[in-house]
Image: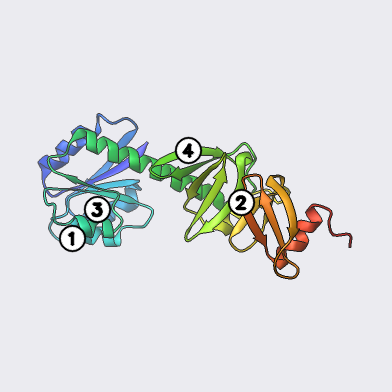
Amino acid sequence: MLRVLLVDDEKLALMEMQRLLKNIPDVEVVGQAINGKEALTLIESTSPHLVLLDIRMPEMTGLEFAEKVPSHIHFVFCTAYSEHTFEAFALNAAGYLMKPIEPTRLAAVVQKVKLMVDEDVSAEALVEDACLPDSHGLLLKSGQEYQIIKIRDIDRVESVGNHVAIYALNKKLYLHVSLSKIEKKLNPHDFIKASRSDIVRLSSIKTLEDGMATGTLSVILNTGHEIEISRRQAHSLRKSFSLDIK
């Protein structure tokens, strides 16, 4: 169930939003507030995934609320004013709906947040210590779509800013998690950290040869990607393929 908190200083607006949400499956309204200040207090007791809120409200506006809301909570502005769009998305709003709210647009943004929450959960699962089994699925993003990929199908993991790019089934997908966290979840018998920015599956390595720099290696994966193996990791890789006789 997607837990939703409603925030608006107009009672009729709250009633209308509640009515519209009843037609969207797997949604639970966990509370209502009349301004951002009250909403911040309610967050502690209701633990919402999503906050639907107006912008112009007394005591604390929706924009002021967005600056204070915990980063793991998604929020969508529902307002009669179009001039705050830039500010809203600069604050990482998940959506911006104009009143009167169109049911189809509300349903679409709720579905979008559901997928974002699932992605957060998928990333959070990587924090635990134990390695994930090959059959475990990760919810990964490709453009505006999401797809579940099994660990056994992953050929390579590449660090890209504060995300990782995961190469699997001839696709490049993304997960909002650090490379170090996902490294802890991958079986070291199946994967090796090639460098500071790459992890590769051993069985996906097609060819291996000396690299440009002394002591380094260069590998080509079944996917066609060529990756330089750092000097520090070259010894471990040679050992994995019994190339180091010492």
* Label 4 with label 3: CB-CB less than 8 Å: no
Q: Amino acid at mark 1?
A: Met
* Label 1 with label 2: CB-CB less than 8 Å: no
Query: Which corner quadrant holds the N terminus?
Result: top left
Q: Position of residue 178 (x, y in %)?
A: 53, 58
Q: Residues within 10 Å of mark 1 (few under 14, many from 20)?
A: some
Mark 4, secondary structure of its residue: strand
Q: Is residue 87 visible?
A: yes
Q: Position of residue 49 (x, y in %)?
A: 35, 46
First in residue order: circle 2 vs circle 3: 3
> Viewer-nearest of labels 1 and 2?
2
Name the colouring of the figure. rainbow
- Identify whether 79 is placed above or below 67: above
CA distance separating discs 1 and 4? 38 Å
CA distance separating discs 3 and 1? 9 Å
First in residue order: circle 3 vs circle 1: 3
First in residue order: circle 4 vs circle 3: 3
First in residue order: circle 2 vs circle 4: 4
Q: Which residue is mark 3?
A: 39
The label shown at residue 147 is: 4
> Viewer-nearest of labels 2 and 4?
2
Q: Which residue is mark 1?
A: 60
- Identify whether 35 is placed above or below 138: below
Foreground residue among 143 and 217 = 217
Q: Amino acid at mark 4?
A: Gln
Q: Is residue 81 left or right of residue 33?
A: left
> Viewer-nearest of labels 2 and 3?
2
Mark 1, secondary structure of its residue: loop
